[in-house]
């Protein structure tokens, strides 16, 4: 976990709200219907940051379940504070490594959507291998998605966008919604613009969205 200081409000929120909304790897395999008290399409977001857009999406789609994974504890605290204040019951959260949670806790074929927005770009070339979007990760995501499920990525680093496109266009069992070699022409309406993204846009930074769906025939 990234070492960072938490505000008193974030600490209080984490302490007060974790029992209601928190999940852990120690609990073992996740039964989504038990965690949410219902069967519904489930969205899993890896790295929700401070949680603003994640909570906004959950508010906008109360018919869906939302699972967030974030190791940045101030972000977890802030997100839980927003969730409790809005009285949302369609959010659950892990504060552990995403790959470990996907591998050990999330059942195959249980998710309708996986979201990965603005992941760490590891922009130095020698560190590119640390980027989460790699061929092995693509297949891990594919196993967790339902047939016809979607994997939505966004980044403001062009080099990373190019890597995402290369990896995912070559990934078995996925189809690029925009067409081979193409990014989405604009931000999908369901993805809110974050404060971080707004700042980047003001500075002239580009943003690339990529959306892939699993091949239902391939997974049947």
Image (cartoon, grey):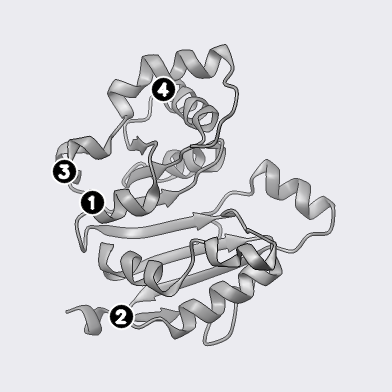
Where is residue 188, by image quadrant? bottom right
Q: Which residue is identified by label 4?
A: 84
Q: Is residue 149 left or right of residue 124?
A: left
Judge the density around disc 3: few (<14), some (14-19), many (≥20) Cα neighbours within 10 Å.
Answer: few
Residue ID at (47%, 77%): 168
Of marks 4 and 1, which one's residue comes earlier in the chain? 4
Inter-mark Cα distance, 3 to 4: 20 Å
Which quadrant: the C terminus? Answer: bottom left
List the residue tagged with mark 1: 104
> Answer yes or no: do the residues labelled 3 and 4 have beta carbons within 8 Å?
no
User: Which corner quadrant of the image does residue 189 belong to?
Assistant: bottom right
Label 3 belongs to which residue?
33
Label 2 neighbour load within 10 Å: few <14, some 14-19, many 20+: some
**Disc on the earlier residue, 1 or 3:** 3
Is any atom of residue 37 visible in this view? no
Position of residue 26 relative to residue 64, above or below, is: above
Which residue is tagged 2?
215
Whole-number angstrom distance, CA of label 2 to CA of label 4: 37 Å
| Mark 3 and mark 2 residues within 8 Å of each other at the beta carbon | no
Residue 85 on image: x %, y %: 46, 20
Place of residue 143 in the rendered image (x, y in percent of width and height, measured from the top left):
26, 68
- Element class at badge 2: loop
Which of the pair 31/86 is nearer the observer? 31
Quarter assignment of residue 141: bottom left
What element does badge 4 sit on? helix
């Amino acid at each position: 976990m990234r070492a960072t200081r938490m505000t008193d409000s974030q600490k209080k929120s984490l302490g007060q709200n974790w029992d209601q909304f928190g999940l852990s790897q120690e609990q073992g395999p996740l039964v989504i219907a038990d965690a949410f008290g219902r069967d519904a399409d489930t969205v899993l977001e890896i790295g929700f940051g401070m949680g603003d857009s994640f909570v906004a999406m959950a508010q906008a789609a109360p018919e869906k379940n939302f699972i967030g994974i974030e190791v940045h504890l101030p972000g977890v605290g802030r997100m839980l504070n927003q969730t409790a204040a809005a009285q949302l019951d369609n959010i659950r959260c892990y504060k552990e490594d995403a790959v470990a949670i996907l591998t050990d806790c999330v059942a195959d074929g249980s998710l309708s959507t996986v979201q990965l927005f603005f992941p760490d770009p590891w922009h130095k070339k020698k560190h590119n291998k640390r980027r989460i979007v790699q061929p092995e990760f693509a297949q891990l995501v594919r196993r967790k998605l339902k047939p016809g499920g979607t994997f939505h990525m966004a980044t403001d680093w062009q080099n990373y966008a190019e890597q995402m496109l290369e990896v995912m266009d070559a990934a078995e069992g996925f189809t690029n919604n925009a067409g081979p070699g193409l990014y989405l022409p604009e931000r999908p309406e369901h993805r809110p613009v974050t404060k971080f993204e707004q700042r980047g846009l003001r500075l002239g930074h580009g943003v690339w969205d990529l959306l892939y769906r699993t091949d239902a025939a391939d997974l049947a």
